[in-house]
Image (cartoon, rainbow, N blue to C red):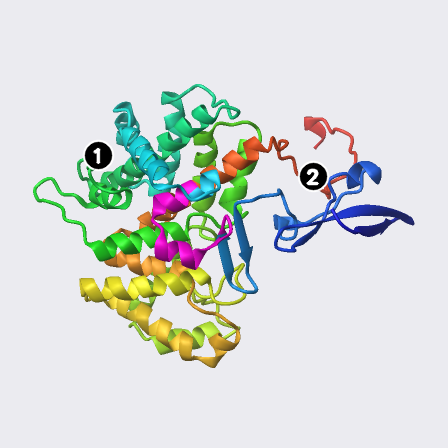
Amino acid sequence: MSDNATIEVGGKSYELPVFTGTENEQAIDISKFRGASDGVITIDPGYKNTGSCLSEITFLDGEKGILRYRGYSIEDLAENADFLEVAYLLIFGELPDTETLDKFYTDIKKESIVDDDIKKILDAFPKSAHPMGVLSSLTSALTAFSPSSVNVDSDEEMYKSIVRILGKFPVLVAWTMRKKQGLPLDYGDNKLGYVENVLKMMFNKPNEEYENNPIVVEALDKLLILHADHEQNCSTSTVRIVGSSHAGLFASLSAGISALWGPLHGGANQAVLEMLNGIQEDGGDTNKYMAKAKDKNDPFRLMGFGHRVYKNFDPRAKIIKKAADEVLGDLGIEDPILDIAEGLEKEALADPYFVDRKLYPNVDFYSGIIYRAMGIPTEMFTVMFALGRLPGWIAQWREMRLNKEPIGRPRQIYTGENLRSFVPLDKR
């Protein structure tokens, strides 16, 4: 703690401590303000200026376009690490050595079998069910097959729960897609790496041998790394606040999946493809839609450009743009939707209106393009986001429990009616 801030309310002054983080971010500590001020609270709709916790996991500077996991730049990690290395780093705080990483891989593979009764739950869903609703339900259902509470003070129990969900979650992701497509469920192959196995479980056909494309594998690996954590966003703060009631890991993750489902959060990459489809159905004229996007009186919004947090270029977009170019080049796909996407990208990067306002393509724009090129259905895009975000949610849940954070309980300002007398039904 350093320095103090003074708040004056009703002629009284209150001294509040100012906290400074390791990256020199400053925060006024109001945790005891309500008690000291006889009930005065602060109000911050959407918590845009409220720090809900102290965290050592992710640092994000939207003004400078910086994203770091545990002190490592996202650029460095995407270039040199694989997804499970990054998962271990996020959850446990340090990059693993070879022996530790090998054990992590092995332990996750051992937990990759999902109880056969989960298939009965999956069978109960109609094919029309949205994959995110299915995934949230199946994740919550895992609690029934591991009903005992995790002793968070036991490193062994905590570790077992973490590798259990990391092993089973990709299976649920793949089964969710295969259910939608009417394909038989697949457990993949434990001889494969984590990302390779995800792809095989999703795309393997019973009447042909599946072969992974290394460029596609690398692109998906990078996408998962880029989505692995992003500070206190809607779904992450949901996981933490649900977990603060001492709800279990699986239940907390299920809540996070539901929060991610929203189009203002994880559904953004799906919204990009829906926009591109709409442009194609209207003739595919990108110039027309660029003009609409610049017209303040036009309700059209260009999805996948700019970012709520980043006021500069999304650092993740810089990395994944290269992967998108490589995937499209290698697969040689002829797809008018992808042609429209490339046209919008080139025009936006050259148009002063977008450049001056720093409305660059973001990670959702490029991830949607890559997923479509891979053959992943649009409604599965947010499910893939959840797969990437899984280690971040786990890390945030674990940190919250180990720090013994109090149960989340926001306050409010009541704006309803004052005390009223009850009116009997026959006199209303």
Task: Determine whether the residue tagged by mark 2 lies in a helix, strand or loop.
Answer: loop
Above or below for 102 versus 141: below
- Residue 85 lies in the magenta-colored region: yes
Q: Residue at x 49, y 61 (%)?
A: 307
Sequence order check, earlier mark of 2 and 1: 1
Above or below for 392 versus 246: below
Q: Residue tagged by mark 1?
A: 187
Pick the residue in front: 217 or 239: 217
- Please identify the quarter of the rendering in which residue 292 is found: bottom left
Residue range corresponding to the magenta coloring:
69-88
- Residue 418 lies in the magenta-colored region: no
Residue 320 rendering spot, x and y as whole percentages: 36, 61
Q: Residue tagged by mark 2?
A: 411
Residue 98 rendering spot, x and y as whole percentages: 34, 41
Nearer the observer, disc 2 or disc 1? Answer: 1
- Name the magenta segment's main secondary structure: helix
Total marks shown come to 2
